[in-house]
Image (cartoon, helix red, strand yellow):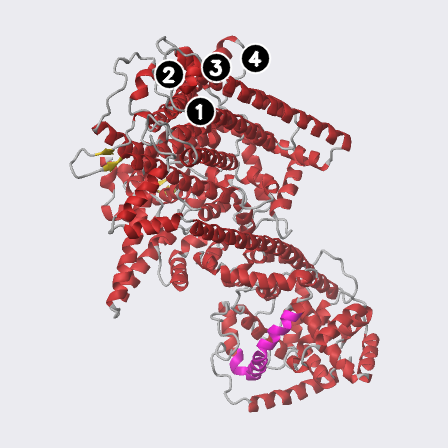
């Protein structure tokens, strides 16, 4: 030990000299604020020193100027160090394992970042929010004003102003929001004094006005929601699933209103003003017309056939072109529907199918989204508890089942069965379609040839049959779907819905095809003559006939849904279940069937509205009644559904089906307008070869007039093949680009997900390192022997004792250390619990966010605990490097490095090392040994160090030893071994240089920051003992 | 209406309307709801705080298994007893309203579910959520719970650290379209 002491003194002396040299060579001393000489940390604002830390640093700055000079010198290398760290970071799993795609991900993420910077910056105040989240509830309440200030600054920084809609979306309480707002207002008043151009003021005012207007309308529309109270009642008692039926119904009701308004205003009213005399004035209103829609009603404003093909000229000089108005009103309505439907379907899709892996989010939605916050009744709540429990158990067992794969035999069985059921379905559908077609051709003869007789039944027979099919078939379809053994009940539901939809559309298609078939569209008389009809009074007007058919279908469907699906299925069943049959279950509201009925009804309306303009009125009225009837029935008769309804996804399906049926009916109408010949004796288009010819003549008229010629030119151009071709080509390109982009994003998201996984592994690795450090501390406690792992607490007193002895050693430079030596209890669990909450978030998805606040607050919470702080640094370093947006340096780094240097100066052990290193350039024994032990590792390190200019490490090399010793987990080394290694190294001076570099790498890999001191503390203690 | 509209000046209403997702009319409606819970408030005017027990008498919260958490999250009470002033109540209704954006709702849902307020949903929190969800139907068995936690973490825990941070929570919730439907209280 004596020789060791001598060495020690020698080192100290030489270091003294070195430091003096530094002092004399530095021109601007160190009287400046310690923050000031920080060229590389320009973004750094305020290191968090605890109060006493601050005191010490000032004191020490006076006394130990050399420390600062040293540190300052090192700071000059900070940038290089950072680069070095980045290289070291490559050792982490996320870098090494993911290296294949790593660079790609980073680039892509950068690209993504620039693309969506707007979206991200819209989420201003994230870091403050983050801090707020980190702070406890109490802290928030106490620091309201500060928080408000910070958020205000942040919002201002990101936008230049504070918008009220953003304020509204802040997850803060009212008090804070109000404070921010008042700040914004105050600021605005300040700004008024500035000289701003007239135009700017005007622009600003306009944008303000527009924003206010938008907001007002939004709120008015939002608050003027129809039937909100009823919806709330239904949802409160039956959950959002049943509620979604009523929202759907409400949507349809609202959708039918514009149709009614358009038709009434532009088609019906002009016709009422100038009525056309009836061709058959004897027909009287008998009452049965309400059901059949025929006879007296035939020649009213109800149907297409009644409307004139003349110009209406009530006021002299003003013409009203009825045919044009008729077509344009319908077209306008269809366009409106198209826009609304596409919009709602698209937004639904966006919400529901964000990710393709929807099946994976099973548990998430079951746990986090299963409670309906809107329900109010105790029974519903109880039921919901039960439902959630059963469902959780179900999916758990399902998960187990999913792992058991079906055998080939079973698979064959299932698929064979499915083929059979599809065959049955197709057979049934085709059969019903054929039946409808056949019956229709029978009934039409009956109707056409027996005009004088009262023939209510044949007239409504077809509607009755169609409605009956619609009522019964879905039940059969549902029944056969149950046997198909779908893996998920959801798929079963989708299949049943799809079949139901196909059937309904098939039936409607048959009816439409029947009326538009070419053999019916003939000149009046010719067909009926061949059928031996004695009288042929009725004008053969197939449009009116189709309108009547649609009318009947709508009416009968409405009656059916009231009588059967409401009265029988709900009311009677409830009565029976309550009073007669004990076994019968209480009725539940069948969402699927009811919604499908609505879709069917709406399709009918779309098909019929061209032929019967007032059908829109009837449908509107029907929806209105339906809402109340259904609501009363549900509230009185039904029990809440026993299965939780995934409202969002099914709503998407329903919306999509509605859109599909709309497109089908629109296609049908297109055929009618562009392909078919209108009846020659009725309607606004009599005499024209095609309906759309009315537009052609209209354009011709425009072209004939000199003042409107340009308009005709535009319309002709827009309607030309060239233009349409260009539009289609443009759309195709847009679709292709979008598709490619979405593909790219999907790949990127996949890659980023992998990256996140790897970063999780980084954290795990870093935590292991931390644990190793603490374990090592434990080992030092036992003087190199294998210590009892897990019992680390008692390390601390010993550590601090060592430190005390260091501090009080006479050779210690600068007297005793005045700071609080690290008193922390570093246990693995401690580190884990402290590190986790703050750090682990930063590596997550949010790694695109700035985490300055995050780190700040963690520093605050552990600032008394330098060891821990260092650990945190090391951890936080990692997401920082990853974060493409991170521009800030870690604010606390300066603080910690500063402290580190202080300790280094004061610690004789450290100086010894420094001396050794600077003189002999020898590696640390541990690192050297380690290199021997692990050739692969060594090689990797060497490779890396070769890539880098060695000058970079001038500043950092001196700290290598302490860290590498801490890195080691081998406790059995001894002086001879070390000396031996040393000799070896000295014999190879060139390689020793390299090895030193690799040591530094070691240091970094364990610490991320070479200037860290605390982790190496134990290493120094050890050294001291060795000496 | 008369009584409640006289409680607020027009400016106050305007401010409330600006800071929440409600129109002035709706703010008054919220106030009426608030008064319904305890008619004495009217005499005490605006500064009055409604105790957690009273707030939980609201029909939606009465059956809600997380009612106490909701109160705590929205409360600005200095004594941390979960009592709500009218402004807190208004905040709450605003967050639960239809107009509130998803991000805001997710933020508050996270707070509500974070029982131990450590800004992380750990297994402890999730167990608590599940236990409360099953509520009167009885808790899940231990092995079921374990399996559930495992599966849930598999789905949601992107970085494999055994707990859900806010970012992870936000991410998985964004994939569950049901969330917006469920995290909603109609006025």
Q: Are marks 4 and 3 on the same chain?
A: yes
Q: Is residue A271 left or right of residue A991?
A: left
Mark-to-mark CA distance, 3 and 1: 13 Å
Location of residue B70 with respect to A532 vertically, above or below: below
Q: Earlier along the polypeptide chain: callout 4 or callout 3? A: 3
Tell me where residue A218 appears, x and y as whole percent: 33, 45
Sequence-earlier tag: 3 or 2? 2
Is residue A668 or residue A197 the one in the foreground?
A668
Q: Which residues are magenta?
A: A60-87
Local SS, label 1: helix
Pointer 4 residue? A583
Callout 3 crowding tier (Cα within 10 Å): few <14, some 14–19, many ≥20: few
Residue A190 on image: x %, y %? 27, 66
Residue behind mark 2 = A292
Whichever of labels 2 and 4 marks the residue nearer the N terminus, that label is: 2
Q: Report in which chain the residue with disc 2 lies.
A: A
Q: Earlier in the sequence, mark 3 or mark 1?
A: 3
User: Can you say which quadrant of the picture contains the N terminus of chain A?
Assistant: bottom right
Is A476 placed above or below A394 here? Answer: above
Q: Which mark is residue A515?
A: 1
* Circle 3 residue: A442
Which image quadrant is residue B48 in? top left
As helix, strand or loop, the secondary structure at mark 3 comes to helix
- Name the spot of residue A205 as percent of width and height, x first: 26, 59
> CA separation, marks 1 and 4?
48 Å
How many numbered marks does the figure carry? Answer: 4
């Amino acid at each position: 030990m004596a020789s060791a002491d001598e060495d020690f003194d020698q080192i100290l002396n030489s270091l003294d000299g070195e430091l003096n040299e530094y002092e004399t060579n530095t021109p601007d001393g160190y009287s400046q604020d310690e923050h000031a000489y920080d060229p590389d940390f320009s973004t750094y604002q305020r290191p968090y020193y605890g109060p006493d830390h601050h005191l010490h640093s000032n004191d020490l700055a006076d006394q130990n100027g050399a420390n600062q000079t040293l540190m300052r010198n090192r700071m000059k290398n900070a940038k290089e160090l950072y680069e070095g760290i980045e290289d070291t970071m490559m050792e982490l799993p996320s870098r090494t394992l993911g290296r294949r795609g790593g660079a790609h991900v980073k680039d892509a993420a950068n690209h993504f970042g620039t693309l969506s910077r707007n979206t991200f910056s819209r989420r201003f105040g994230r870091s403050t929010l983050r801090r707020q989240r980190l702070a406890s509830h109490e802290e928030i309440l106490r620091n309201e004003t500060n928080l408000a200030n910070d958020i205000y600054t942040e919002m201002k920084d990101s936008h230049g102003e504070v918008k009220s809609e953003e304020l509204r979306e802040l997850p803060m309480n009212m008090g804070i929001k109000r404070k921010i707002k008042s700040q914004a207002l105050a600021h605005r008043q300040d700004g008024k004094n500035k000289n701003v151009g007239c135009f700017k003021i005007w622009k600003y005012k306009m944008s303000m006005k527009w924003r206010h207007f938008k907001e007002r309308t939004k709120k008015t529309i939002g608050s003027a929601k129809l039937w909100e109270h009823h919806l709330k009642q239904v949802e409160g008692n039956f959950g959002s699933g049943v509620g979604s039926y009523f929202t759907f119904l409400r949507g349809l009701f609202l959708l039918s209103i514009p149709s009614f308004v358009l038709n009434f205003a532009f088609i019906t009213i002009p016709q009422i003003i100038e009525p056309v005399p009836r061709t058959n004035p004897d027909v009287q209103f008998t009452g049965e017309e309400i059901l059949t829609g025929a006879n007296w009603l035939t020649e009213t404003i109800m149907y297409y056939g009644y409307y004139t093909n003349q110009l209406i000229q009530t006021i002299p000089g003003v013409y009203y072109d009825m045919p044009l108005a008729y077509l344009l009103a319908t077209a306008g309505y269809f366009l409106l529907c198209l826009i609304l439907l596409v919009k709602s379907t698209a937004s639904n899709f966006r919400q529901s199918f964000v990710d393709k892996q929807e099946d994976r989010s099973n548990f998430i939605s079951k746990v986090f989204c299963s409670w309906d916050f809107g329900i109010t009744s105790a029974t519903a709540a109880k039921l919901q508890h039960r439902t959630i429990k059963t469902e959780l158990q179900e999916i758990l067992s399902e998960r187990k089942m999913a792992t058991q794969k079906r055998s080939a035999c079973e698979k064959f069985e299932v698929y064979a069965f499915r083929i059979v059921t599809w065959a049955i379905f197709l057979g049934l559908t085709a059969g019903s379609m054929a039946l409808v077609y056949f019956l229709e051709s029978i009934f039409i003869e009956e109707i056409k040839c027996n005009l004088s007789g009262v023939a209510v039944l044949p007239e409504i027979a077809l509607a009755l049959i169609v409605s009956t099919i619609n009522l019964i078939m879905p039940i059969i379809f549902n029944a056969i779907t149950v046997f198909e053994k779908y893996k998920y009940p959801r798929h079963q539901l989708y299949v049943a819905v799809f079949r139901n939809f196909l059937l309904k559309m098939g039936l409607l298609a048959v009816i439409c095809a029947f009326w538009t078939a070419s053999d019916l569209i003939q000149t009046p008389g010719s067909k009926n003559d061949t059928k031996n009809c004695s009288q042929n009074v009725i004008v053969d007007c197939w449009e009116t006939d189709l309108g009547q058919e649609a009318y009947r279908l709508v009416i009968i469907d409405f009656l059916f849904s009231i009588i059967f699906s409401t009265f029988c299925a709900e009311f009677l069943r409830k009565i029976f279940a309550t009073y007669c049959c004990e076994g019968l279950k209480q009725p539940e509201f069948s969402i699927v069937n009811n919604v499908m009925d609505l879709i069917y009804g709406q399709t009918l309306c779309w098909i019929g509205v061209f032929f019967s303009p007032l059908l829109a009125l009837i449908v509107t009225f029907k929806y209105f009644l339906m809402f109340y009837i259904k609501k009363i029935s549900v509230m009185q008769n039904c029990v809440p559904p026993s299965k939780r309804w995934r409202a969002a996804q099914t709503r998407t399906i329903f919306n999509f089906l509605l859109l599909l049926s709309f497109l089908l009916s629109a296609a049908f109408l297109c055929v009618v307008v562009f392909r078919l010949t209108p009846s020659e004796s009725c309607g606004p288009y009599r005499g024209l070869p095609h309906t759309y010819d009315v537009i052609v003549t209209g354009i011709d008229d425009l072209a004939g007039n000199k003042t409107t010629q340009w308009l005709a030119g535009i319309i002709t151009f827009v309607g030309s093949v060239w233009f349409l071709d260009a539009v289609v080509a443009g759309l195709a390109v847009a679709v292709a680009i979008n598709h490619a982009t979405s593909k790219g994003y999907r790949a990127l998201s996949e890659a980023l997900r992998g990256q996140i996984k790897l970063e999780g592994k980084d954290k795990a690795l870093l935590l292991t390192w931390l644990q190793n450090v603490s374990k090592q501390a434990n080992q030092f406690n036992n003087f190199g022997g294998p210590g009892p792992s897990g019992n680390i607490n008692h390390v601390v007193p010993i550590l601090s004792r060592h430190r005390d002895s260091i501090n009080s050693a006479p050779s210690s430079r600068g007297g005793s250390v005045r700071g609080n030596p690290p008193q922390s209890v570093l246990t693995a669990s401690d580190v884990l619990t402290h590190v986790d909450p703050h750090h682990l978030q930063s590596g997550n998805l949010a790694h695109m966010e700035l985490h300055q606040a995050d780190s700040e607050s963690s520093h605050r919470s552990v600032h008394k605990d330098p060891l821990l702080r260092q650990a945190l640094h090391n951890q936080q370093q990692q997401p920082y490097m990853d974060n493409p947006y991170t521009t800030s340096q870690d604010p606390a780094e300066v603080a910690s490095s500063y402290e580190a240097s202080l300790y280094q100066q004061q610690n004789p052990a450290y100086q010894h090392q420094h001396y050794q290193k600077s003189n002999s350039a020898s590696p640390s024994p541990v690192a050297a040994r380690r290199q021997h032990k692990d050739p692969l590792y060594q090689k990797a390190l060497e490779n890396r160090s070769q890539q880098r200019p060695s000058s970079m490490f001038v500043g950092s090399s001196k700290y290598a030893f302490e860290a590498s010793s801490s890195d080691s987990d081998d406790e059995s080394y001894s002086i001879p071994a070390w000396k031996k290694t040393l000799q070896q190294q000295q014999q190879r001076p060139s390689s020793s240089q390299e090895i030193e570099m690799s040591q530094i790498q070691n240091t970094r890999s364990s610490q991320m920051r070479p200037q860290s001191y605390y982790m190496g503390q134990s290493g120094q203690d050890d050294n001291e003992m060795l000496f | 209406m008369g009584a409640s509209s006289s409680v607020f000046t027009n400016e106050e209403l305007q401010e409330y309307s600006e800071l929440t997702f409600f129109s002035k009319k709706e703010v008054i409606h919220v106030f009426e709801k608030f008064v319904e819970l305890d008619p004495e408030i009217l005499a005490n005017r605006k500064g009055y705080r409604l105790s957690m027990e009273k707030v939980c008498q609201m029909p939606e919260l009465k059956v809600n298994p997380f009612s106490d958490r909701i109160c705590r999250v929205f409360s600005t009470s200095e004594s941390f007893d979960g009592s709500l002033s009218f402004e807190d109540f208004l905040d709450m209704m605003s967050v639960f309203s239809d107009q509130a954006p998803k991000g805001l709702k997710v933020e508050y849902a996270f707070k509500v579910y974070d029982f131990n307020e450590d800004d992380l949903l750990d297994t402890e929190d999730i167990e608590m959520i599940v236990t409360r969800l099953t509520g009167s139907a009885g808790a899940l068995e231990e092995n079921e719970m374990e399996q559930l936690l495992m599966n849930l973490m598999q789905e949601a825990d992107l970085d494999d650290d055994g707990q859900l941070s806010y970012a992870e929570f936000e991410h998985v919730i964004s994939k569950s379209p049901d969330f917006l439907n469920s995290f909603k209280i109609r006025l």
